[in-house]
Amino acid sequence: MIVFAKPSSGVPSRPSRSKTEQAAPLTATDSLAHIVIVGASLAGMQAAQMLRRGGYDRSLTIIGDEPHYPYDRPPLSKQYLAGSWDESKLRLRAAVDPDELGIDWRIGVPARALELSGSSVMMADGTSIPYDGLIIATGASARRLPGPDLEGVYVVRSLDDARALRDAFDAEPKRVAVIGAGFIGAEVAATARERGLEVTMIEAAKSPLGRVLDTAAGLAIADLHRSHGVDVRLGVGVHSLVSGEGAGAHTVAGVALADGTVVEADVVVVGIGVTPNTGWLEGSGLTIDDGVVCDETCLAAPGVVAAGDVARWPNVRFGEQLTRVEQWDNAVDQGAYVARRLLAEDEVAPFAPVPWFWSDQYDRKIQLAGMPTSSAEVVHGSMAEQRFVQIYGRPDRDELVGALAWNRPRQAVQARQLIEQRATMAEARETLGG
Ligand SMILES: Cc1cc2nc3c(=O)[nH]c(=O)nc-3n(C[C@H](O)[C@H](O)[C@H](O)COP(=O)(O)OP(=O)(O)OC[C@H]3O[C@@H](n4cnc5c(N)ncnc54)[C@H](O)[C@@H]3O)c2cc1C
């Protein structure tokens, strides 16, 4: 029988954490007199909070290249871009009072290099910061299209990016083209439509979110957008951006597609994925391969751990394969975990969470638990009515490893618990179906 834990109160859509992430007292060892965190955002802040909460009272420095105290990114493509939230709502709760955690903030200056042998972070302003323990949480940056920079072309990764795009939307552009139908592109398209703008979404793959969802679920996303008036172009790549003529030569005027057509646009949003921020670690001696490669406990080198969008580690729950997870929930849990990992004197359990992601598009809440695989099966509702639960099985044995829930938050929570408990597919059908 499958037993469910009560969902945690206060955060209704976020299921309870796995055993590896439960808070436990930390041991502040004498050998760690100074911990440095590079990356002043979600994973870094969670690590700082966990260190302090666990009793670490020694010196703590956070380095961040952005000129802002840590803020939350998910609203950037949702409430903030829609104009319904202002910037004061974005600040991460733990950073509302920057003095509270007794942190030495180094904001607005990037780390330029890591000297592993000397245990020192070299800063872009020429200074160096020695450490006894290092947490790498430098996240990822939005990929851009090759070619010259044109006015009117945007990405959405940082607050400054979102500010610029929001200003462009406020100016009521005639046409918006979104390149890439991943989660960010799809959310930006939805927000733009809800603001009454004319939107074309362009995707080279045959269905949206092809990297994550199966074709049928991806096409359900396309249908959702079409039903809200988005012109969705699938299976066609981008040839180049088109600029205006004469005085408008440095301003975007449209997107030329590989099939020879041109989508006219005065705002173009590029949502073609991210690249982990590891440039500053080149030559450091750490293994860099699509992220900072770590062991199953997120250790990249003695005294050096990594967390969040930049970390790549084997999640042993799903096998030996290295994974890098670009999700809010993972950054929270992994940030907290690495703080404990750094200070642990005993062996620690591997970081092996069930991943958890949500996306808001129009009035839909799309939630994804675990790892999608090619064996997908709808067990509740239907894609046509856009309320359904789809489950994913492990290819090598009878085990639930993933679930996608559309406007079915209760089942999403249950699905995550079922994955944690290694439920069979039959158990998943019985619990989530109906
Ligand atoms: C628009 C948007 C919407 C999203 N929506 C969702 C959602 O709905 N659901 C969900 O699960 N996830 C969502 N995410 C993903 C989620 O926000 C990320 O997974 C999370 O922010 C990762 O946190 P992080 O701390 O690992 O990295 P980041 O948030 O990327 O932070 C890394 C920080 O390190 C800084 N940095 C980089 N290099 C250096 C350097 N050399 N020196 C100093 N600082 C450096 C960066 O500038 C940045 O401030 C969204 C992301 C975006 C951009």
Image (cartoon, grey):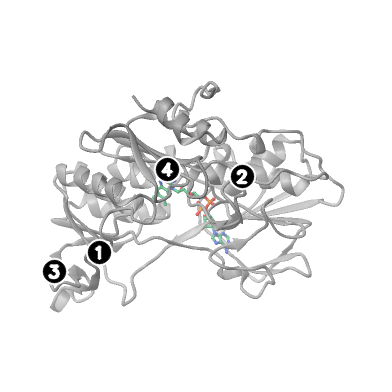
Q: Which mark is residue 352?
A: 2
Foreground residue among 283 and 153: 283
Of pointers 1 and 4, the one earlier in the residue sequence: 1
Label 1 element class: loop
Q: Which residue is mark 4?
A: 392
What's the residue type where badge 2 is placed?
Ala
Label 2 element class: loop
Distance between the Cα atoms at labels 3 and 1? 16 Å
- Do the CB atoms of the residues marked 3 and 2 lie less than 8 Å apart? no
Foreground residue among 110 and 363: 363
| Residue 34 rendering spot, x and y as whole percentages | 77, 52
Q: Residue at x 14, y 78 (%)?
A: 246
Of pointers 3 and 4, the one earlier in the residue sequence: 3
Q: Which mark is residue 262?
A: 3
- Do the CB atoms of the residues marked 1 and 4 lie less than 8 Å apart? no
Of pointers 3 and 1, the one earlier in the residue sequence: 1
68 shown above or below 264? above
What's the residue type where badge 4 is placed?
Tyr
429 shown above or below 176? above
Q: Quadrant of residue 408?
A: top left
Q: Which residue is mark 1?
A: 152
Q: Is residue 217 visible?
A: yes
Label 4 element class: strand
